[in-house]
Amino acid sequence: MNDDITFTGERLHAGDPLFSVDLARHEAAYQLARQRMIDAHRVLDLGSGSGYGTAALAREHPRVVGLDRIRPDSKHRDDGHFLRADLGGGIPLASRCFDLIISFQVIEHLEDPTDYVDAIADLLASDGTALLTTPNILMSDGINPFHVHEYRANELGDVLQRRFGTVEVLGIGATEPVHAYFAARSARIRRIMRIDPLGFRNLLPRGLVEWLFARFAVLVRRQTQADEGTPQASWQDFPIGPADDRCLDLLAICKQPTDA
C-alpha cells in the first residue's frame, strides 16, 4: 500500500521535475546545513515534511533526526531517523541535546510561533546553532493557503531574539535567470487571480481551497514552463547574503539559546 504523504503543491517531494527550481531553492539552505553539521554530534530537522532533506543529510551524518507531525514519504524512511510529534503535544526529546537544529519553511505555517521558537531554543545545545528559513514577504505571491503569517527580516529577528542571544538574519537570493523565472510565474499568478477580484475564494471550505491550490501550483508551473521555459537551476543559483527586498527567502542563524 502506498502511504506517502499527500501532494499539496506546497510541500516539496524530491524527484518532481516540475518543481526542480523550488527544490534547488531549498537545497541552498541544506547546503549550509551540511557545512555546519561537520562539527555537530546530533542534528535535528524540525518540520521535515516529506523527509527528502533529512534523508540527504543522514546519508552524510550518522545522527540526523527528522521530526514532523506527519510521516515522511516511504522512499526516505530508511535514511535517518524520523519521529512523529506535534508541538502542541510536546516533543519527546531531551533538552539541549542537539548541536545543530534546522527548520526550513516552517514558521510561516504558524499563527503563533511561540511554542515553535521555545522548542528550538530548549532542544539546542548551549553552544549549538539553529538555522531557520522562511519566505520573504516582500517577494511572496501571498496566495499560499498554508502560510498564515509571512515575515520581513526585522520582524523575524524580533521573534527569534526572545529566545536567542545572537540572531543574524540573512537572505537567500537568486541569479537573474532564476529571478526572471519567478517573476514570470508571479505575473501569471496575478493574471489568474484577476478572475476573483473580490476574494470570493476565501469563502470556500478550507479543504477545497487547499485542493485547488495543489492543482493551481501544477498549472502555473506547466504554463510558465511552456511559455517562458524553466531554468536548469542548482543550489548555486541561490546565493546567501544580506537580507534585502529582492531576496526570496530569509535565513536566520540563531545561537546562545536563553531560558524562557
Image (cartoon, grey):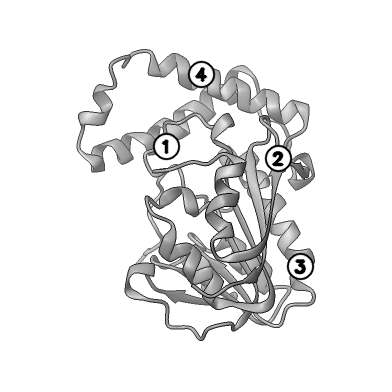
Can you tell which of label 3 and label 4 is closer to the viewer?
A: 3
Q: Would you say 209 lies left or right of 18 here?
A: left
Q: Which mark is residue 243?
A: 2
Occupied quadrant, residue 143? top left
- Judged from the image, the secondary structure of the residue bearing numbered disc 1 is loop
Q: Which residue is mark 4?
A: 188
| Amino acid, disc 4 | Arg
- Judged from the image, the secondary structure of the residue bearing numbered disc 3 is helix
Of callouts 3 and 4, the N-terminal one? 3
Q: Would you say 227 lies left or right of 202 here?
A: right
Of callouts 4 and 2, the N-terminal one? 4
Q: Which residue is mark 3?
A: 36
Q: Nearer the viewer, residue 120 or 49?
A: 120
Q: Nearer the viewer, residue 76 or 121?
A: 121
Real-space Cα separation, disc 4 to disc 2, in angstroms? 26 Å
| Amino acid, disc 2 | Ala
Can you tell which of label 1 and label 2 is closer to the viewer?
A: 2
Of callouts 4 and 1, the N-terminal one? 1
In the rendered image, residue 109, in percent from the top left (x then y), is placed at 42, 50
- Judged from the image, the secondary structure of the residue bearing numbered disc 4 is helix
* Label 3, residues with CA under 10 Å away: few <14, some 14-19, many ≥20: some
Real-space Cα separation, disc 1 to disc 2, in angstroms? 22 Å
Of callouts 1 and 2, the N-terminal one? 1
Occupied quadrant, residue 2? bottom left
Q: Which mark is residue 144?
A: 1
Of callouts 3 and 2, the N-terminal one? 3
